[in-house]
Image (spheres, coloured by chain):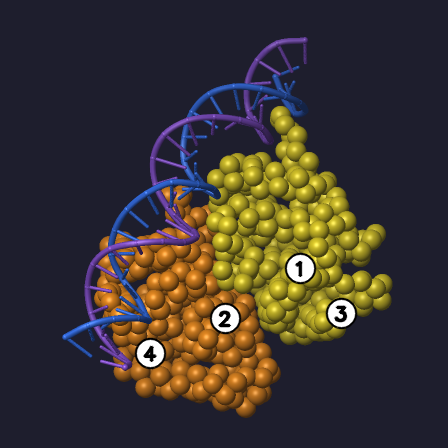
Chain colours: A orange, B yellow, C blue, D purple
Amino acid sequence: MSDRDQLAHDVLTASRGRSGGEQAPGGRPTFESCVERLATAIRLGVYPYGSTLPPERELAGLLGVSRATVREAIAALREAGMVRTTRGRGGGSVVDHEPPTPGSEPGDPTGASALRRPELLDALVFRRVVEPGACFVASTVGRSATDLEELRAAHERVRSAQNPAEHRQADSRLHLAIAALTGSAYLVDAVTQVQAAVHEMLLAIPVLPVNIEHSSAQHAEIVAAVEAREPERARRAMEEHCDDTAALLRGLLR
Amino acid sequence: MSDRDQLAHDVLTASRGRSGGEQAPGGRPTFESCVERLATAIRLGVYPYGSTLPPERELAGLLGVSRATVREAIAALREAGMVRTTRGRGGGSVVDHEPPTPGSEPGDPTGASALRRPELLDALVFRRVVEPGACFVASTVGRSATDLEELRAAHERVRSAQNPAEHRQADSRLHLAIAALTGSAYLVDAVTQVQAAVHEMLLAIPVLPVNIEHSSAQHAEIVAAVEAREPERARRAMEEHCDDTAALLRGLLR
DNA sequence: GCCAAAAGGTCTGAGGTCTGACCATTGACG
DNA sequence: CGTCAATGGTCAGACCTCAGACCTTTTGGC
């Protein structure tokens, strides 16, 4: 199993969306959580645009559900325009470019997420703990050459992103790559959750080029510290990165 | 909703046991996760010995499942000897003293948990990130007087514990109380997970009085730092505490 | 060009879970 | 001392999910 597959496994295994504690009363938690986990994995760049999702039978194993449920989830993604499915050998579901605002609720996203705002702000607190911690651990544990390769590739993808959407996805992917360096499924799970929340928040605010530049400088420092195996420096750098992002989000979301 | 109820909500909402990614093929993930979450909440001292669990209808809401499933889960706990159930007004399920080794599998726990050892060791890594982070946050955010009262009460319970089992439970409760200080459901969730893992590991090794003494000194320092609102000091103290516990566990579990 | 492998598409019976209502028991309160 | 509200106990129908086999389509390799 390659590193990418391992990361995919961890991300797909990540806790279902914290919908406030209670599950949907409709009575179909499994199907909905599958849709959410797959959509999150795609949005966070685990399966980039144009790539092919694993076969349904494999996804069923990764997600821990039956193939029938996976199929329903993929059908939902297909209806949402996130994937295209073809049959036969070499076929599968390829990730399509996400439409601008395909949201199931046509209402404005800010209004819809008003109920989730406390949870999203909580995610920022959690992130300030988890991501710097992941940087610290990533700077101490032994990591394979392929792991480091993944890290550099993810960093490069962030720097060469052509548009905000691409940058956003590559950014998430970089943060996940750092977490994956630790080899801790718990940490990857936690970072997946916070990145999903951050992603959702960033979609709701305007992204300025100055923000991206600032972010890129911090990314460089973080990656350098992790590669140099300097735990304290890596943690500090990620703390600053989280603080700045959090300040931006807290300011623009209120 | 009181602080205690809020904590109960967070703990019960915590992610289901990370059974390695895949769910039990038997096909009853919900029921089993209910049993595990309730048992964890009891073991971690959210519902101390002799206290009464919330009514079934309320638990159903907290756990996000139907009352029928809650009833099955409580029935399982009853068969395991963890609770006693009485009917009528003022009745309910009261937490009974846990029998020494009621485990569903009569096999030795070490052998049974051999498969989970990588996950348990991973929990130690995650803990080293999450608990110090919770201490840091708890030392920065505003906390209510009742929150601080909870903290002091939990600390006092640890110090006055009469036997190892009681000490173990009070210790978990103290760590949860610190996490609850942050007001972050994510952090409480994470600490719940790591405490459940730590609890499981500590049950498998002999506990020496010298370990408890060492631990108590660190607890005092941690609580003092949190109360004094010194984030760096609190984090550092908890890091040491986690490192020492981890060293003990890693040494005795291999 | 043929064929086997790889993928999605379909079906069926069994079993788990949810919703919602109703019954039975008991103690708190007037 | 009686009432009744709170609590556990029970049931039925609908829906969801699972497992596994089988079919259909497509393509890569011989």
Work out how far the residue at label 3 is from the one at label 1, CA to CA, in angstroms. Answer: 16 Å
Work out how far the residue at label 4 is from the one at label 2, CA to CA, in angstroms. Answer: 20 Å
Question: Can see residue A180?
Answer: yes
Of A247 and A176, nearer the camera is A176
Q: Give the crowd class for mark 3: few <14, some 14-19, many >=20 residues within 10 Å.
A: few
Q: Which residue is mark 4?
A: A167
Q: Amino acid at mark 2?
A: Val
Q: Position of residue A181 (x, y in %)?
A: 51, 79
Chain containing the residue with disc 1: B
Q: Amino acid at mark 3?
A: Leu
Q: Give the crowd class for mark 1: few <14, some 14-19, many >=20 residues within 10 Å.
A: few
Work out how far the residue at label 2 is from the one at label 3, CA to CA, in angstroms. Answer: 27 Å
> Which residue is rendered at x = 32% and y = 57% of the image?
A71
Mark 2 element type = helix
Mark 4 or 2, which is nearer the eye? 2
Chain containing the residue with disc 3: B
Mark 3 element type = helix
Chain containing the residue with disc 4: A
